[in-house]
Image (cartoon, helix red, strand yellow):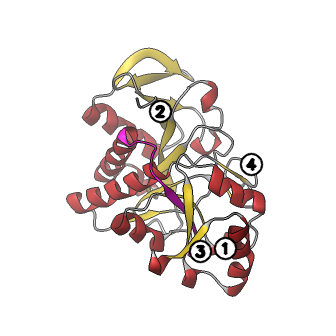
Amino acid sequence: MKGLRVLITSKQDTASLTIKDILITDYGFTKTNDVFEGNPIFTKGDQTKLITTDRDMIHCDHLESFFDAEAFIFCSRHRAESGKPALLVHSTGNLGSEALFGGLPNQLSVSAPSLVSVALKRLFKERNAKGLDEFDVSLEVTHHGPTSMNTPLVFVELGSSEKYWTHQDGARAVAAAVTDCVNEPLSGDAVIGFGGTHYASKFNKLVLEKDYKIGHMAPKYAINNLTVDVLDQMISRSTNPIKSAIIDWKGMNAENKAHVLPMLEDANINVIRAKNA
């Protein structure tokens, strides 16, 4: 039986509140007498809660003190200097020694590869169905907090500027994706990814066309500073067994390969080039 899934929105996040309104209006969430941080809790059946926090969501490492959940699903804004509209999904964590946006250095959350993948598929489906041609849809690599909880989590995001945080059809696409995350089992083998840019376009194809479930991803800019401990977390901090590492071969330089490939061999992880996956 599926455990409790908790959807998180924030009073500090305009996009999340837009998504919240759609979840209540279109998906049948009903208000309860319970509150979290003074904000009403909504439910849909016995196994799904919709909560609102007063905190910025990247600082929500406290949630499992209040909820015994199978997974946390964050309905979040995305901010980018480009301001380009985007629908995004990713696991969280700090791959290196900096923790500028929540969480702790060199610490990863528990990824939920099956949720990441089902969300990406639904975001693409919704973009096409709603004619949201201006929106990029993509995986992002592992970044920002929360990092310290042992409850699996995923961020599904609407971006990338204030103009789009209230975009109704964009918010409906995220609402549909998080609803799929509520219903998706945490099962099946999964992979981790290495190389490429922050927006992991090479890995999008593997999810959409080859049905891969993908957990933590380390981009080119983070690889040379990866420690054995963080690599171990990429493998172990996952709801789904990690059987292989997919390498964006052209998205890595010789120094990247010299650093990470021996680590993967020592970890007894199968290595697959993305073009051969």
SS for callout 2: strand
Q: In the rendered structure, which segment of residues is drawn in magenta? A: 183-196
Residue 159: give x, y in percent of width and height.
44, 57
Residue at image point 42% right, 62% down: 212
Residue assigned mark 3: 195
- The secondary structure type at the circle numbered 3 is loop
Establish if 208 lies above or below 253: above
Hey, which residue is sitting farthest front in the picture?
268
Which residue is painted at 49% across and 31% down in the image?
A: 52
In percent of the image, x 59 and y 74: which residue is there? 195
Residue 119 x/y as whole percent: 39, 52
Does the magenta portion include 192?
A: yes
Residue shown at 46% from the left, 79% from the top: 276
* Residue 193, image quadrant: bottom right
Tag 2: residue type? Val
What residue is shown with label 1? 221
Q: Residues within 10 Å of mark 4 (few under 14, many from 20)?
A: many
Disc 4 marks a residue whose amino acid type is: Leu
Question: What residue is shown with label 2?
Answer: 6
Q: Would residue 72 appear left or right of 265 to someone viewing this image?
A: left
Determine contact: label 4, label 2, CB under 8 Å: no
> Which percent across, then down, holds residue 74?
49, 43
* Sooner in the amino-acid sequence: mark 3 or mark 2: 2
Query: What secondary structure is marked by label 4?
Result: loop
**Sequence order check, earlier mark of 1 and 4:** 4
Q: Amino acid at mark 3?
A: Gly
Q: CA distance from mark 1 to mark 2?
A: 32 Å
- Dot 1 or dot 3: first in sequence order is 3
| Label 4 sits on residue | 104
Q: Is residue 144 visible?
A: no
